[in-house]
Image: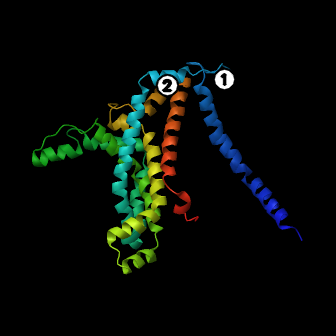
Amino acid sequence: MTPAPDRTRRKLSLGAWHALPVIVFLLLGFVAPLLAVIGYSVMPERTFGIWQPPTLENYVTVFTGTSYISFLWSLSLAAATVAILAVICYPVALGLARVFGRWSSALTLVFTIPLFVSENVRMYGWILFLIKNGVLLGTLKSLFGIEMDSWLFTRGVIVFGMVYVYLPFMLFPMTLGVSMVPRETRDAAFDLGATRWQVFREIDLPLSMPGVVIGFLLSFVLAVGAIAEFKVLGGQQVIPITHDIEIAFTYAQNWPLGAALSVLLMLVVGTLVLLVLRRFDLDAILGRR
């Protein structure tokens, strides 16, 4: 009879062999490009060879230039987008999970349909809708005599565009989180005399927190990397950090500077994400204890 430790060791060995293709794929598809970007970030300016003495001049250029303004715009507008999405999506998630019942799948499909259309096409559609004498403002002028200037090329319309684009990425995790709350627990709380606010504060929100946190992080990371909304709807009135990265890698042909900006963006976003996660007990949220 094979001893228990030997069987456990054999299972671990078999599992490692089965996981090897996934590990290789992650190393080639994620770790290797990440290391390449980090390596390029310490190369001399406008250098394309890999065998160059490392330097920190690209990071000095970032901190002594105006790129920090782009960082602040990207982070602040992404945070505003996440806050607005949270206010919009949580009530909708409650409705999808509890109110609409068998119609929830059909309504979820309605929110999914825009994802099948290119983001740029949808942005240009909003231009036709919001431009002066366009669909919305032209209709107001024709029917009610209300003449207004174009709503385009403002910070508000940039946030509107990001809320529109990233709404499904906040809504679906939230809906999943809300659906994880047991109905029996809520009913028991009501039977014990709890008010609706107490049930929401003590049961609904804590137990749905995994979906809420995932929706927050997913929407924030995507919004920080947004660029189409700034270019198309914002008319480059606000320059995000992604635009600086694009310019460095394309028109400026300064790959080391673009890599340094990318590394700093990953560090900033990664640090913020870790700070948020530290405020939550993930083991308790996920039911591990």
Looking at the image, is 282 positioned above or below residue 139? Answer: below
* Residue 50 sits in quarter: top right
- Residue 140 lies left or right of residue 211; in this view the side is left
- Can residue 231 be seen here? yes
Looking at the image, is 150 positioned above or below residue 212? Answer: above
**Which class describes the residues within 10 Å of circle 2: few (<14), some (14-19), or many (20+)?**
many
- Can residue 251 be seen here? no
| Residues at marks 2 and 1, CA–CA distance in whole angstroms | 18 Å
- Position of the C terminus by quadrant: bottom right
Q: At label 2, which amino acid type do we have?
A: Ala
In front here: 11 or 199?
199
Looking at the image, is 267 positioned above or below residue 55? Answer: below
- Residue 146 lies left or right of residue 182; in this view the side is left
Residue occupied by mark 2: 248
Exactly how many numbered labels are in the figure? 2
Q: Earlier in the sequence, mark 2 or mark 1?
A: 1
Residue occupied by mark 1: 50
Q: Residue at x 48, y 67 (%)?
A: 180
Q: Position of residue 95 (x, y in %)?
A: 36, 66
Which numbered circle lies on residue 130? none
Element class at badge 2: helix
Looking at the image, is 59 positioned above or below residue 90? Answer: above
Q: Position of residue 203 (x, y in %)?
A: 42, 68
**Which class describes the residues within 10 Å of circle 1: few (<14), some (14-19), or many (20+)?**
few
